[in-house]
Amino acid sequence: MMNLGTQTESGINHLYSRMTKGTPEPKIGMGATVLLWTDRHPATVVFVDQKMRIVTVQEDISIRVDKNTMSDMQEYEYKRDLDGVFYTFRQNKNGGWNQVRLNENTGRWNKVKGGVGIIFGFRRAYRNFSF
């Protein structure tokens, strides 16, 4: 889950990161949305460990298809990107997801300070042109 003002400046991303009730269980091949400071990137679930509650997604390619230039009204098509960035998340006790990294020395998953957020079940891209 993302904290507004320190991990995200987007009210939408803040709310998405907390929307866990009623969302589908992550499954390999499922769409997901990586939540950044104000932007959103589409992704695909590529690994699920139900026992450890660990999920890895890989960022997809988003292609802008509207003609709205630097507008908030944005429409995208999505394609898998086998060279896309990987993000790993672990579900916390409250049902939210935190970005984690594996500590090679200890074999433990550690929460990434200021990490990105995730929501499962759909792909969305959004670019904030005001930065």
Image (cartoon, rainbow, N blue to C red):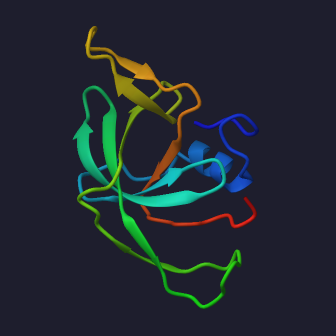
Residue at (73, 39) in percent of width and height: 4
Residue at (60, 91) in percent of width and height: 67
Q: From the viewer's perspective, is residue 30 above or below residue 74?
A: above
Residue at (71, 78) in percent of width and height: 71
Q: From the viewer's perspective, is residue 79 above or below residue 65?
A: above
Relative horizontal placement of residue 107, taking residue 8 as reference (left or right):
left
Q: Nearer the viewer, residue 34 or 64?
A: 64
Relative horizontal placement of residue 20, taking residue 61 as reference (left or right):
right
Residue 41: percent from left, percent from top:
49, 59
Residue 115: percent from left, percent from top:
53, 34
Q: Nearer the viewer, residue 100 or 90?
A: 100
Q: Where's the C terminus, which quadrant?
A: bottom right
Relative horizontal placement of residue 45, taking residue 65 as reference (left or right):
left
Which quarter of the figure has residue 72? bottom right
Q: Where's the N terminus, which quadrant?
A: top right
Residue 123: percent from left, percent from top:
44, 65
Residue 37: percent from left, percent from top:
64, 47
Q: From the viewer's perspective, is residue 41 above or below residue 14?
A: below
- Tally of marks: 0
Name the residue furthest bottom. Answer: 67
Residue at (48, 24) in percent of width and height: 93
Name the residue furthest front. Answer: 131
Q: Nearer the viewer, residue 3 or 91?
A: 3
